[in-house]
Image: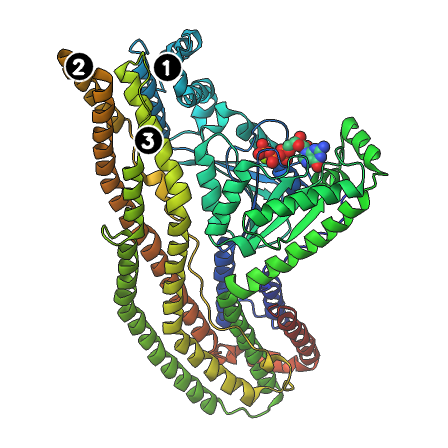
Amino acid sequence: MPDGSSSGLSLFPPLAETRFQLEKLAELLQWKDAPQLRHWQETLQHAEARLQQAKVRIAVLGAVKSGKSTLLNALLGADRLRRGAGILTSIVTRVQPGEISRAHLRFKSKSLLDRQFQAALAFLQSSDSSLPSCELDHASERQSLLHWLDEQPVAEDTSHFGEERAFLRACLVGYSEAVGYLSNSTEVQTWSGEESYQHQAWVEQDARAVFLEDLLLEEPGWTWQGTEIADCQGSDSPNPLHFVQVQEYASRSNLLIYVISSRIGIRQADVRLLRNLHQLGLADQTIFVINLDLNEHEEQADVGRITEQILRDLRQCGWQQPHYFTFSALHLLLQRKLELTTREQKQLEFWQDHPVFQISANAWKIFQEELHLRLVHQQSQTLLAGEWSHWQRLHRQVSEFVERLQATLSTENLDWEEWQSELQHRQRYLRYHEQNLQHTLKGGEKKWRQHIDHGVRALFDRQEGRIWSSLERFLKQLELTSPKDNFSPNIQSMLWVQEVREQLLRWVVDEINVSLLPEIARLRSEITVLVNQAVEPFFEVLDELQQKEYQLHSRLQKGSLSSIESPKVYWQFPEIEPISFTTTLAFQTPEQLRSWLLYGQSWFRALWRKERNLQREFHQQSQRELKRQLLENLDFDVLNYQENLKYRYLWSGTQQLLETILVCWQESARGCQADLSGLLGQLERLRSERKQLMPLLLQWQSNWRELSIRSLPV
Ligand SMILES: Nc1nc2c(ncn2[C@@H]2O[C@H](COP(=O)(O)OP(=O)(O)OP(=O)(O)O)[C@@H](O)[C@H]2O)c(=O)[nH]1
Ligand SMILES: [Mg+2]
């Protein structure tokens, strides 16, 4: 049964209610097409669209089978994410709130898939020239390759290409089912309602998961608006790229929930990931869930013992006083889930009188409260501060508008001329400031661009930058393993290529990303602060103007609305997917591999003719050549990454930020030119109705004021 204790977090500020109240006002005044009201409604729509993008992110992390998906399901109150034995989570599965269940699956583009497929094929071809070539869209070629893979005995020295074999197989087996979703661009497939369960089949089988690039679920059970929670791959997943995806998602998250199974405790892979999170500066954002396996622990003392052990291990990883919760995710899921299988029913009954039951239930409650607090805090303090001020301005403007209207309706002889001239004065004043704002943004662009340029250049400087010094250290320490006795130079070359690729990947994850990702975050926040500082005075102009007007006309008591302190203008860097250093790096393309392979073969022939110390020479020369090739590739890839980071991420984000700021300023400026001239035609009618209208307006005002008081930032 759902316990209903997860209270939802509403979008902050309360846009939907604001829209509702504005509609009500239009109704009261029977004035649906008033330009001023329409302007405010549009302002709200824009804010809503921006807030749809802005997300507080929560990453659920942990080892394989620690219960990550189970915990997420417990939070949703339904079995929405596939859970069970084996490595199921092959892709970061993101969950956002939605009115009904929806699954959005983004498929790889045809060209990306082809590239990956041909690269894997090139590896295998090196080991066996009888391997047929294959274009994925040729059914007969697929069939013969699959046949070859099934029939060919796996020789000892080719067993190293297990990963490539598995990938090729998955592509071949799943292709006919996936082909409908593949095209030249990335395709998004959406399943709604009952159909949305189909997504589970796509993530749990390799023959389908290989075609996927991204998976987003909308779930009514996830009620925290403006947030996203992600079920990440296990820290000990055998696929090294999974670790990268987890690292990258975690580094963008505001909160991390690390799940540790009480049955298993902390494993070696956890230690690596935990240290990594620490280095990324995410320690304070991490909370731990010790997932109790109720079948394993008969009594409380046992739980205590295990908890102690886990805490000791966490201290080793850098958490002196970890924030942790101890409960059984499966138990809570079964309690909340609506339809139970007979087995689940039995399990639940069996646990009914379990001595640890109460500890688990209490911890769950506190866990949810903690989650709520942290999310609200994140939303109000950082993410939405700018939007909050924007909304607050609109709120004040509408109040002012209604008060003016009331004044107009209750005065018999209104001095329109005075009113008009005041409005014109305001318009001139704001136009002047708008021009200034635009000048400031134009002038700032050059400075900010330079700031980004310097920052990125400092990171990637060949002499002094951290990235190259780290890459050079990598190249220096790189040692190829000795060749096998019965080596075939073809296979040996490919094995070395693979070996180097894996080592490089690991190096980037453990040595480079841990400093690169925080540096990028720092650069992003520096730019954000600089831009905010530059535009702040312009928002102050708006606020001052309004404050003055507002105090003049306001009949509200001091101590209510006007005394509420708004947070400082704080516009956030927009949501753009960061560029991944790891996936930009070398040895991705089959061409590079092929050229290396050709090189290896010619070397072998040349050496063979000389017939001396073949193996050692081959080893040494290969190492030299591979390092040279790698360096060449790295030169190109790092430059490529650097440019993308600068232009496609930092600069493009800054431009978006500037656009948003300008639009918001203009919206607010227009909103405070509360132009009642459009009202002239309506005035006689409204005046004749004022006896009924005034009390209704008063009532409306009190609801309107209520909105603002309820939405105070925490
Ligand atoms: N007995 C018991 N089983 C549990 C508990 N939590 C999870 N399980 C089971 O353990 C299995 C693995 O749980 P998942 O939630 O799929 O684990 P995961 O961490 O998402 O695993 P991957 O996605 O493969 O990394 C599932 O069959 C769960 O039902 C628990 O507290 N007690
Ligand atoms: Mg899982």
User: Where does label 3 land, which residue?
Assistant: 500
User: Residue at 83% of width from left, 38% of height from top?
Assistant: 354
Q: Earlier in the sequence, mark 1 or mark 2?
A: 1
Name the residue nearer the viewer: 237 or 138: 237
Residue 157, which numbered label? 1
Whether tag 2 and tag 3 are in contact, CB under 8 A, the answer is no
Name the residue nearer the viewer: 586 or 530: 586
Q: Is residue 495 above or below residue 560?
A: above
Q: Amino acid at mark 1?
A: Asp
Helix, strand or loop at disc 3?
helix
* Label 1 within 8 A of ligand 1 by Cβ: no
Q: Is residue 194 above or below residue 58?
A: above
Give the CA separation, mark 1 to mark 2.
24 Å
Give the CA separation, mark 3 to mark 1.
17 Å
Q: Amino acid at mark 2?
A: Arg
User: Residue at 62% of width from left, 53% of height from top?
Assistant: 322
CA neighbours of label 3 inside 10 A, class few (<14), some (14 to 19), many (20+):
many
Is 636 situated left or right of 418 in this image? Answer: left
User: Where does label 2 land, which residue?
Assistant: 612
User: Residue at 28% of width from left, 62% of height from top?
Assistant: 449
State the image quarter where residue 285 is shown: bottom right
Q: Is residue 160 above or below residue 280?
A: above
Helix, strand or loop at disc 2?
loop
Is 607 situated left or right of 261 in this image? Answer: left
Give the CA separation, mark 2 to mark 3.
27 Å
Q: Position of residue 318 (x, y in %)?
A: 54, 51
Whether tag 3 and tag 1 are in contact, CB under 8 A, the answer is no
CA neighbours of label 2 inside 10 A, class few (<14), some (14 to 19), many (20+):
few
Q: Amino acid at mark 3?
A: Val
Q: Earlier in the sequence, mark 2 or mark 3?
A: 3
Name the residue nearer the viewer: 275 or 580: 275
